[in-house]
Image (tube, rainbow, N blue to C red):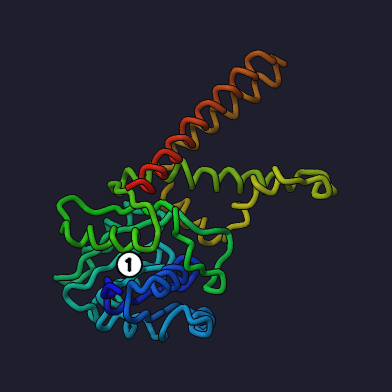
């Protein structure tokens, strides 16, 4: 058996993603020791009881001697967390995160770290509307895309070690600039969540018994609107600039559909729907091709 890639992994924030990183790293023998830290004691106790981590500590205690730190906290709290742990980080330590917004993170965090400590941004495109370490899965990242967002001119060895870590967890790694990442996830993640939440909000005006008729299509479409409101409120606000373009284009598409419906123009409606299906197929085929190419490597 090969030696672990890292000696000590400290994970700050043991939600679904942080807990799954811990579980996957332990299951695959990528680290000798996993220490967990979180704002609240309850998730820590559950993670320890489930065997997801070897031990628990405060954030500043957890990172002592760590050669890899994963930030699993909400993006808005990361600067405060990093400022707190920075004095305890050892030279050569790598820091990454699982946040779904990157430009603001890259702008804030590297300047808070001591010399000899590198931050490389990460965003595993995995998860669910469920939260907490009790939902952590060692296979959560298998086949999922993980976007790595290095800074221009950053240490190549640090980037490669972080990418190798995610690949070892089973992820397909894609590299993007922070701004490109935010623009692209605005389309494929943030806008779909926003639309699902907007539809769920519109249900306030639906007939009282409408839920009795809801089937699979309703459940598929609305599942992500069950996601944590505090978490997604922060994500949408932080990526608001990148979201504005996709949101405007979606609003225009919705307006076109409403107009042809009002006009009773069946031919135009069919063309719009067919064009939408074709574009969706192109995007989905691109994702499938990337997956096949990665599996064949």
Query: Is the residue 72 above or below the residue 258 in the image?
Result: below
Q: Position of residue 82 (x, y in %)?
A: 30, 71
Relative to the observer, which residue lies in front, 71 or 206? 71
Query: Is the residue 180 above or below the residue 167 in the image?
Result: above
| Residue drawn 41% across the image and 45% down it | 291
| Label total for image | 1
Q: Position of residue 209 (x, y in %)?
A: 85, 48
| Residue drawn 50% across the image and 28% down it | 279
Residue 163 can be seen in this image: yes
Query: Is the residue 37 above or below the residue 233 in the image?
Result: below
Q: Position of residue 104 (x, y in %)?
A: 33, 55
Relative to the observer, which residue lies in front, 54 or 225? 54
- Compared across the picture, whether 3 is left or right of 170 comes to left
Quarter occupied by residue 33 = bottom left
Quarter occupied by residue 184 = top left
Query: Is the residue 106 above or below the residue 59 in the image?
Result: above
| Residue drawn 74% across the image and 48% down it | 204
| Residue drawn 76% across the image and 44% down it | 205
Q: Which residue is mark 1?
A: 79
Residue 108 can be seen in this image: no
Q: Residue furthest front?
A: 1
| Helix, strand or loop status at disc 1 | helix
- Compared across the picture, whether 177 is left or right of 54 comes to left
- The quarter of the rendered structure image containing the N terminus is bottom left
């Amino acid at each position: 058996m090969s030696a672990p890639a890292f000696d000590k992994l400290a994970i700050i924030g043991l939600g679904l993603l942080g807990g799954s990183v811990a579980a996957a790293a332990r299951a695959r023998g990528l680290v000798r020791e996993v220490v967990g830290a979180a704002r609240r004691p309850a998730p820590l106790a559950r993670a320890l009881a489930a065997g997801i981590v070897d031990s628990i500590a405060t954030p500043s205690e957890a990172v002592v001697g760590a050669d890899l730190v994963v930030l699993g906290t909400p993006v808005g709290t990361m600067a405060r967390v990093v400022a707190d742990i920075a004095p305890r980080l050892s030279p050569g330590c790598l820091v990454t995160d699982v946040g779904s917004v990157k430009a603001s993170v890259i702008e804030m965090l590297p300047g808070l770290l001591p010399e000899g400590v590198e931050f490389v941004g990460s965003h595993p495109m995995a998860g669910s509307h469920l939260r907490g370490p009790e939902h952590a899965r060692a296979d959560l990242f298998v086949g999922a895309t993980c976007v790595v967002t290095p800074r221009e001119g950053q240490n190549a060895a640090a980037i490669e070690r972080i990418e190798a870590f995610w690949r070892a967890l089973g992820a397909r790694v894609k590299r993007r600039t922070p701004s490109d990442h935010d623009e692209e996830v605005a389309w494929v993640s943030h806008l779909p969540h926003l639309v699902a939440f907007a539809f769920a909000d519109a249900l306030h005006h639906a007939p009282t018994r409408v839920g009795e008729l809801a089937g699979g299509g309703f459940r598929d479409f609305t599942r992500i609107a069950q996601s944590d409101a505090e978490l997604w409120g922060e994500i949408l606000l932080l990526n608001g600039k990148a979201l504005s373009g996709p949101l405007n284009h979606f609003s225009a598409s919705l307006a076109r559909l409403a107009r042809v419906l009002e006009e009773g123009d069946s031919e135009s409606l069919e063309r719009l729907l067919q064009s939408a299906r074709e574009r969706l197929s192109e995007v989905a085929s691109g994702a499938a091709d990337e997956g096949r190419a990665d599996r064949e490597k």
